[in-house]
Image (tube, helix red, strand yellow):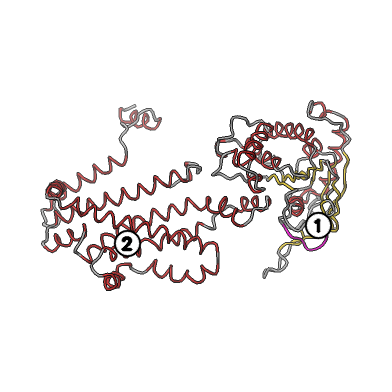
């Protein structure tokens, strides 16, 4: 038996294990190295290597450009997302519970869900002017409809046998809702919030880029006009980190609310 | 006392496909107070349908069900059901699941938890009251289901093949436990099963239901003495047990569509 064959056999038997490195960290490392290498190989002005981008990022933080704008952007995001959650979940619950409400609103929700949300930015701009309200409105526009759609669907996933059990104990509608329908809907509602959060971050950046006077979006626009790819990508990194952190936050809340789910039933 | 008289039930008669299924035909049945009645029949005979009708979860086409003279029009507080798939709330603890019925009766929290603890103890789950349903085995889950039903102190306990999905050893233990509990509480029980042994072991009488359309073929008295909880093994070896069991099998065998021979082909159920 050759050494290679023995190695393969050992691998198959499972007693040889690669050293434990978190897959996510490894993927980041590979991606980062790839970026760096391609940046050096290509030498095109709009694709600087990662090290240059990170250097620029440190400079920008030092100049105080990032943190102040980030705080502004995040507070808009928080306000917009909160509005989306409160109204989105409420409307979704009403649509799921009452077929007449769904019949009345369903067509609008689906239309707005598929429409490119940025086209409404000029409308909000003309309504609210150069204010935070415009950005918040764009964020809501981006994130509320997916939350409505998922919540509406979530209201129908309660298992039939649990509904029947509730009925057999003479549960009135309110109890059925509070003790069976809503808890059963929670995982899907939370999935909607995760998707909504991702869209809200997009809405925040797009809204800021459209208005181009505030937040991270303005930095991107300014840098873009100067063909300053390093700054654009540096801000992009910040945005991606913000988005991932925001989605992670929703996931943490989700894990608390739906701890009763078996781990196999939970999405990553 | 539960009186089922002239019960007829047909499913799906008004659908566009037109294929209606006659589930029950002229079912007449009388269940005395404090009686343990088992309902036995081949699978698909409508015995679960009958139980759900008594539970008020279904509507029927003709006939009447009365409990202590009052006609059944829906679920009622004097009945409690134990389901084959248990139907526990997966997001609630064992304690909260057992207290669910009491919660609906408006019993205050402290009182219903005290009562629930009592029932949890009765079904042998002390120490598990803070666990979630998914942490329990199938047998333990069904104990929770039984405790939830008993907690509301129903006049009638309706049990729909509660042990059908359990492995044989777990099922035997739960049968023993049920006999032990029932011989203490003597609640009226209607217990649906497809197991002949179970029907004989648990029941005072057995209602034998024919294959679809389901109707009561025969009521079999079980002369086995009570209490039975102490020595199930010797009951199962007794002459009476063996005699009833073989009689039931003869009857059930005739109802099995695939044993009637190749000439009569039964309609797919």
Label at residue A139: 2
From the viewer's side, name the closer residue of A118 and B222: A118
**Residue shown at 47%/61% (left/top)?**
A92
- Badge 2: chain ID: A
Q: In which quarter of the image is residue B191?
A: top right
From the viewer's side, name the closer residue of B61 and A62: A62
Residue A40 shows in this picture = no
Label at residue B71: 1
Within-10-Å neighbours for mark 1: few <14, some 14–19, many 20+ = few
Quadrant of the image for the C terminus of chain B? bottom right
- Badge 1: chain ID: B
| Circles 2 and 1 on the same subunit | no
**What is the span of residues highlighted in magenta in the rendered image?**
B58-64
Q: In this view, does A125 lie above or below A56?
A: below
Q: Where is residue A250 in the image (x, y as percent from the top left)?
A: 38, 49
Q: How far apart are marks 2 and 1 (CA)?
A: 57 Å
């Amino acid at each position: 038996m050759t050494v290679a064959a023995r190695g393969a056999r050992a691998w198959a038997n499972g007693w040889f294990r690669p050293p434990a490195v978190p897959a996510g960290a490894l993927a980041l490392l590979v991606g980062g190295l790839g970026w760096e290498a391609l940046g050096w190989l290509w030498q095109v002005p709009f694709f600087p290597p990662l090290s240059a981008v990170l250097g620029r990022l440190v400079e920008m933080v030092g100049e105080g450009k990032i943190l102040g704008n980030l705080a502004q952007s995040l507070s808009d995001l928080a306000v917009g997302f909160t509005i989306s959650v409160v109204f989105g979940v409420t409307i979704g619950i009403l649509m799921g519970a009452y077929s007449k409400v769904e019949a009345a609103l369903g067509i609008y929700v689906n239309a707005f869900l598929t429409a490119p949300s940025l086209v409404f930015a000029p409308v909000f701009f003309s309504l609210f002017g150069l204010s935070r309200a415009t950005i918040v409105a764009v964020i809501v526009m981006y994130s509320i409809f997916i939350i409505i759609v998922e919540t509406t669907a979530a209201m129908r996933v309660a298992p039939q046998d649990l509904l029947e059990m509730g009925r057999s104990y003479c549960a009135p509608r309110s109890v059925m809702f509070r003790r069976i329908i809503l808890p059963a809907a929670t995982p899907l509602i939370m999935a909607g919030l995760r998707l909504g959060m991702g869209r809200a971050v997009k809405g925040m950046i797009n809204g800021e880029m459209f208005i181009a006077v505030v937040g991270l979006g303005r930095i991107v626009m300014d840098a873009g006009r100067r063909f300053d790819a390093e700054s654009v990508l540096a801000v992009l990194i910040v945005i991606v980190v913000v988005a991932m952190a925001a989605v992670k936050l929703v996931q943490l809340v989700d894990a608390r609310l739906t701890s009763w789910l078996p781990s196999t039933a939970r999405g990553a | 006392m539960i009186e089922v008289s002239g019960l007829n039930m047909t499913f799906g008669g008004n659908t566009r496909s037109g294929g209606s299924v006659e589930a029950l035909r002229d079912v007449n049945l009388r269940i005395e107070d404090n009686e343990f009645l088992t309902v036995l029949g081949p699978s698909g005979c409508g015995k679960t349908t009958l139980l759900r009708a008594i539970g008020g979860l279904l509507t029927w086409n003709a006939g009447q069900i009365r409990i202590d003279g009052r006609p059944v029009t829906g679920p009622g507080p004097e009945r409690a059901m134990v389901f084959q798939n248990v139907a526990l709330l997966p997001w609630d603890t064992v304690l909260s699941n057992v207290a669910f019925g009491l919660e609906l009766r408006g019993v205050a929290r402290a009182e219903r938890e005290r009562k629930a603890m009592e029932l949890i103890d009765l079904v042998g789950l002390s120490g598990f009251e803070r666990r979630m349903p998914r942490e329990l085995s199938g047998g333990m889950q069904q104990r929770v289901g039984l405790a939830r039903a008993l907690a509301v102190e129903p006049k009638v306990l309706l049990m729909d093949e509660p042990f059908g999905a359990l492995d044989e050893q777990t099922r035997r233990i739960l049968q023993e436990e049920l006999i032990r509990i029932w011989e203490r509480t003597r609640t009226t029980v209607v217990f649906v099963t497809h197991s002949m042994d179970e029907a004989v072991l648990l029941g005072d009488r057995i209602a034998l239901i024919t294959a679809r359309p389901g109707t009561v073929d025969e009521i079999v008295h079980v002369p086995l003495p009570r209490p039975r909880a102490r020595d199930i093994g010797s009951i199962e070896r007794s002459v009476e047990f063996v005699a009833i069991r073989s009689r039931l099998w003869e009857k059930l065998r005739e109802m099995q569509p695939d044993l009637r021979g190749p000439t009569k082909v039964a309609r797919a159920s």
